[in-house]
Amino acid sequence: MNAKNSEQVDLDKCFDEKIEELNKLLPKGEQNKNCSAWTFISILDVLGLESVFFNNLAIPLAGGFGGFKSMHGWKGPCGAICGGCAAIGIIMGGQQELKFGAKPRIYLRTAKFVHYFEKEFGSVICEDLCGIDFSDPSGLQKYLDNDIWGKTCYKYVVKAVDLVRKVTCKELKRKWG
């Protein structure tokens, strides 16, 4: 069940069902998605929004950007953070383009999401969370060989989906419920 399929939707129940589904499915492997895509698409699925473009949009936000380490020492955020931030924009905007004046509220809501995630896991940095430097080609191989997804990363997706629900509960009810 999702927001698109029913006039009277219990979004909390839909999120609970999605989180239960993710907890069963994700430890088995990433399939055609990654942490950013799973987070973003799972939330959009609850809202009844589907498109292959969403998956394709979210994929680079994980290992390519999220797992990136710059030559100056900057380290990218976990892909679940990237996907969650994108989903917050969708939720906050509802079915219309966001107006300029809405940005401060969205920034604050996103900061709240990131804060809760950091409080839960001690960091929002991909490498800190999973121990992999995705900017090094051997990092991806280490990630695969050691089943980092099945042991660690999927948990960040599940929590990010739940935290996005938590920080956007009013907008979910008002704009999507």
Image (cartoon, helix red, strand yellow):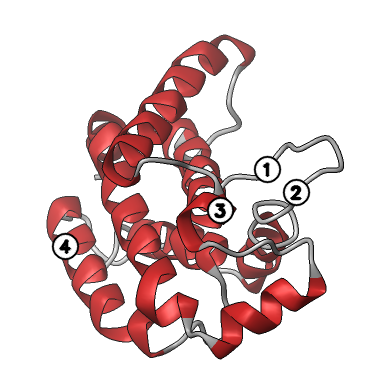
Residue 16 numbered tag: 4
Q: Residues within 10 Å of mark 4 (few under 14, many from 20)?
A: some
Residue at 38% over, 70% down: 152
> Which residue is at 51% across, 50% downward?
128
Position of residue 8 measured from the top left corner of the image (x, y, whole percent): 15, 54
Quarter in which the N terminus is drawn:
bottom left
Image disc number at residue 64: none
Task: Find the distance from the CA under tag 3 to the CA under tag 2.
Answer: 10 Å
Q: Is residue 169 visible?
A: yes
Residue type pointed to by label 4: Asp
Labels 2 and 4: the sequence-earlier one: 4
Mark 1 or 4, nearer chain start: 4
Q: Secondary structure at mark 3?
A: helix
The residue tagged with tag 2: helix, strand or loop? Answer: loop
How far apart marks 4 and 3 lie (CA) works out to 25 Å
Q: Earlier in the sequence, mark 1 or mark 2?
A: 2
> How many numbered marks does the figure carry?
4
Disc 1 vs disc 4: Cβ atoms closer than 8 Å?
Answer: no
Residue 69: give its label.
2
Q: Position of residue 91 (x, y in %)?
A: 42, 40
**Quarter of image, res 135:** bottom right
Numbered badge on residue 75: 1
- Tell me the kind of residue under disc 3: Cys
Image: 129 above or below 149 = above
Q: CA distance from mark 2 to mark 4?
A: 34 Å
Q: Can you give x and y, in whole percent of width and height, for residue 162 in the image?
A: 26, 51
